[in-house]
Amino acid sequence: MTEPKQPAATRPGRGGPRRPRVRAVRRGVPVPLLVPGLLAMAFLLVPLLALLVRAPWRSLPSQLTSAEVWQALQLSLISATAATAVALVLGVPLAWLLARTEFPGRGLVRALVTLPLVLPPVVGGVALLLAFGRNGVIGKWLGAWFGITLPFTTAGVVIAEAFVAMPFLVISVEGTLRAADPRYEEAATTLGASRFTAFRRVTLPLIAPGIAAGAVLAWARALGEFGATITFAGNFPGRTQTMPLAVYLALQNDPEAAIALSLILLAVSIAVLAGLRDRWMTGA
């Protein structure tokens, strides 16, 4: 009596049993999900489309070539880049401490570090004034010992932007560190490398995509910072007036100029999101 033949999908072969192919079943989108989803899409996209529709395209070149716009744009790019550099120098070691070390109150420290994400920017500016102002907790000693004054200066813009942007970098780098295998660092230390050498030669190359993504997010957040900057650094053209502050000022006197400045920030934001999606947030 012959044995029954096994189905082709379950017949053993050199590579083991083959799994049957499952065809994807396309189903319709439920109306209770479709309608709110479309409304949410419209709610988010209509204001941006209105900005494009109402843009003064004919006078846009003259608006963008004015000296005030270029001063604000130059200051925004320089201060955002400097704030990102500060966030990298201070934020990457902090992310490593939160991800790789155990110490009492680590959860509280993590909560405090991420607090600027949800703190109103104006409150952050007031806190910076109380800390680094001329009569602040630290600012009065900076002025007395080193003659350094931070409020209402370009350095104050960098401090304000770094304060609100650094948590984006810390969260991104800490998440990447937690996903990375710590055994590579342990192997390097067993071969005689110090902890810092293992971090520099092994860990940094592993988490480079996370650092890059966090740096871009921090730069974009610093570029769009408004509340803490105007509270701590003021709004002085050529010295502390960044692009968001210039948009706010132009909206009161010249709405077309405000729209032109807003288009620049919109273009930068789209470029940042496109870069993150293509390089670091997906494998495409």
Image: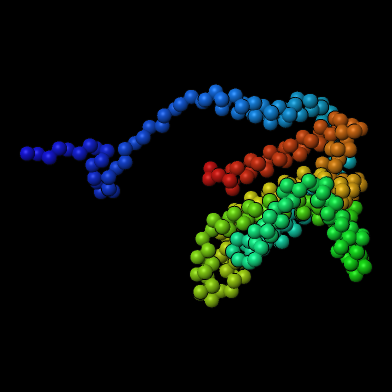
Q: Residue at x 60, y 66 (%)?
A: 102
Observer-nearest of 203 and 57: 203
In the image, residue 234 lies at what x, y percent? 89, 48
Q: Is residue 89 left or right of residue 191?
A: right
Locate residue 4 relative to residue 129 in the image: left or right.
left
Decide: is 149 above or below 11: below
Direction left: furthest residue: 1
Q: Nearer the viewer, residue 259 or 111?
A: 111
Total marks in image: 0
**Residue farthest to the bottom, as pictured:** 192
Report the residue at 51% width, 74% height from top: 190
Instruction: Decide: is 27 above or below 140.
Output: above
Between 67 and 186, which is closer to the camera in this rendering? Answer: 186
The quarter of the picture where residue 256 lies is top right
Residue shown at 77% from the left, 34% from the top: 263
Residue 195: where, in percent of width, then height? 59, 71
- Report the side of 9 relative to 169 (left or right): left
Residue 121 showing in the rendered view: yes
